[in-house]
Amino acid sequence: MSKETLNIVKKFLNSYTIETTPNVYEKYGNFSEFLDKKHSVYITFLPDEKSENVVETAKKLKLEGYDVIPHLPARTVKNNKSLEKYIGELAEEAGCSKILIIGGGGNQAGEISSTMDVLKTDLLSKFNFKSVGVAGHPEGSPDISKDALDLAIIEKNKFSLNVDFKMYLATQFFFEAKSLIDWEKHLNTINNKLDIHAGIPGPASIKTLINYARSCGIGNSLRFLTKQAFNLTKLATLNTPDKLIYDLANYVETNKSTNLENIHFYAFGGMKKTSEWLNHLNDSELEYSNNKFQY
């Protein structure tokens, strides 16, 4: 591993973000024992979740000293009044200035149908949000055509030029760097200028990862994982994303014009387990061989 690639790996490990749910946070009560305050925490808004639970979790994480990035799934919001209430509570009660807006799965609950519908309300500027993530799909989406995804990226780039907050792309998870690299090459053809925060899985069993990939309709990743699980003994084996982190760092080193800015962890194998594995990497003198970090 070159010195430059090692430096990029260390930068990723120092600045990564991680994702939790209100239920997971309640299970632990606090994250301070295993997660450094320098790492921002995303809060997912699951289809059966109540908005007040997300707001309450954001408050508690803020009190612990974390930078918090709640999700806003556009299609689950009933109307602009509910939207303003949720965004206002995040800003004024929880002290949030960052948010991730996604389309959200399932049936549309009301008059809001997309991320752009939320952006165009001007509520994010009204409540002084400074950073707004929007969804990116390196392997496509089972619910949206490739052309529609491209049009959404183009529209969000255009919108980002005339707002007072920074916008970036937060990606769906993937398991091979090639997915991100090929996707960014394509984004360059449609003149994307938004930074990219790459979503990757933390340590988890192959079986767990396959289940998540299947539920999200991520074809390339599902095929990749299935190849890894060619026998039953491998299904229960803990899989860590060493090679993926290394390959992304190497990509940044060799492609100075890339918009890949940071990595984001989906803690499929558990919040504490993921954080402790990352702490170990952060605290170690790293080397890389046989597709694994050696420490």
Image (cartoon, rainbow, N blue to C red):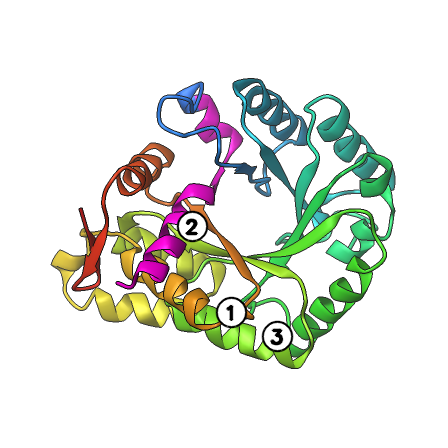
Residue plotted at (83% across, 35% down) = 84
Q: From what the image shows, is residue 189 above or below residue 220?
A: below
- The answer to whether residue 105 is left or right of residue 266 is right
Viewer-nearest of labels 3 and 1?
A: 1
- Residue at the bottom extreme, as displayed: 189
Q: Position of residue 22 (x, y in %)?
A: 52, 29
Q: CA distance from mark 1 to mark 2?
A: 16 Å
Viewer-nearest of labels 1 and 2?
A: 1
Viewer-nearest of labels 3 and 2?
A: 2
Is residue 211 visible in this depiction of the protein?
A: yes
Q: From what the image shows, is residue 223 above or below residue 52?
A: below
Q: Position of residue 130 (x, y in %)?
A: 73, 41
Q: Which residue is mark 2?
A: 12
- The answer to whether residue 56 is left or right of residue 245 is right
**Amino acid type, label 1:** Lys
Q: Earlier in the sequence, mark 1 or mark 2?
A: 2
Residue plotted at (48% across, 28% down) = 37
Q: Which residue is mark 3?
A: 187
Q: Which residue is mark 1?
A: 256
Q: CA distance from mark 3 to mark 1?
A: 16 Å
**Amino acid type, label 2:** Phe
Q: Earlier in the sequence, mark 3 or mark 1?
A: 3
Q: Is residue 243 magenta?
A: no
Circle 3: is it few (<14), some (14-19), or many (20+) Cα within 10 Å?
some
Q: Nearer the viewer, residue 174 or 47?
A: 174
Please state the extent of the stretch shown in magenta in the rendering: 1-26
Residue plotted at (79% across, 30% down) = 88
